[in-house]
Amino acid sequence: MNDDILKVLYSREQIQDATEKMGKQITKDFEGKDPLVICILKGAAVFYSDIVREINTYCELDFMDVSSYGNETVSSGDVKIIKDLDTSVEGRNVLIIEDIIDTGRTLKCLVDLFEKRNAKSVKICTLLDKPDRRIEGIVPDYTGFKVPNEFVVGFGLDYMGHYRNLPFVGVLKPEIYADNQE
Ligand code: XMP
Ligand code: MG
């Protein structure tokens, strides 16, 4: 699996540093606000498990599974709820944890949904941000890294279901995509 990687963009250590910094800021900002911290499955699962352990104040955790991509590397624009939250967001301070913001369509949909469900506030924390590709006016409140416009894998991010378990964020060799287009 590691042989499929062309280059590492962010190492485990760099991600850990960024996560600690974001966690400190989130702890400060959400002290006394008992946020509902939402993991967007599956991509955010790895980052989520790290960031929640850097939030040192009372909070609740919940999980939502949405899909916008299928097995393609370009956004289809559709967002489907596959698994909804167990907890009501009404009157809650919501903090969404994402792996990556690309066009922003997924997040726009989720922010609108939580506002419609009468959340008190909705904030976004993302490991990666690809601002070059933004279509919707979504600006994350906490960002680990701004990434160039490349398809990345690892640390939760997949290509055709694989590579989520890589402990870093990297770029695949072009032949990996080519092999799948035959
Ligand atoms: P939008 O366009 O709605 O997309 O902001 C967000 C979702 O798209 C997926 N995505 C990626 N997944 N490598 C991936 O593995 C990438 O470079 C990439 N860019 C976008 C991701 O699932 C994210 O939640
Ligand atoms: Mg995702």
Image (cartoon, rainbow, N blue to C red):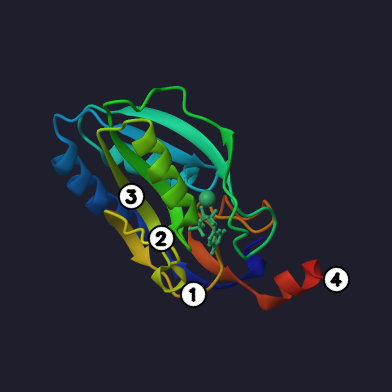
- Residue receiving disc 3: 125
- Which residue position holds label 4? 182
Which of pointers 4 and 1 lies earlier in the amino acid sequence?
Answer: 1
Whether label 4 touches label 2, CB < 8 Å: no
Q: Residue at x 63, y 59 (%)?
A: 76
Cα–Cα gap, marks 4 and 1: 24 Å
Q: Give residue 149's mark.
A: 1
Viewer-side residue, 147 vs 67: 67
Above or below, 9 against 87 in this view is below
Report the Cα–Cα distance between label 4 and label 3: 37 Å
Task: Identify residue type, mark 3.
Answer: Cys
Q: Amino acid type of disc 1?
A: Asn
In space, the residues marked 1 and 2 are separated at their CA atoms by 11 Å
Element marked by disc 3: strand
In the visual, does 139 lie left or right of 134?
Answer: left
Sequence order check, earlier mark of 4 and 3: 3
Question: For numbered disc 1, what is the local secondary structure?
Answer: loop
Residue lying at 30% horizontally and 32% vertically, measured from the top left: 119
> In terms of secondary structure, where does tag 2 sit?
strand
Q: Which residue is mark 2?
A: 128
Q: Is residue 26 left or right of residue 140?
A: left
Is the CB of mark 2 within 8 Å of ligand 1?
yes
Amino acid type of the residue tagged 4 in the rendering: Glu
178 lies left or right of 79? right
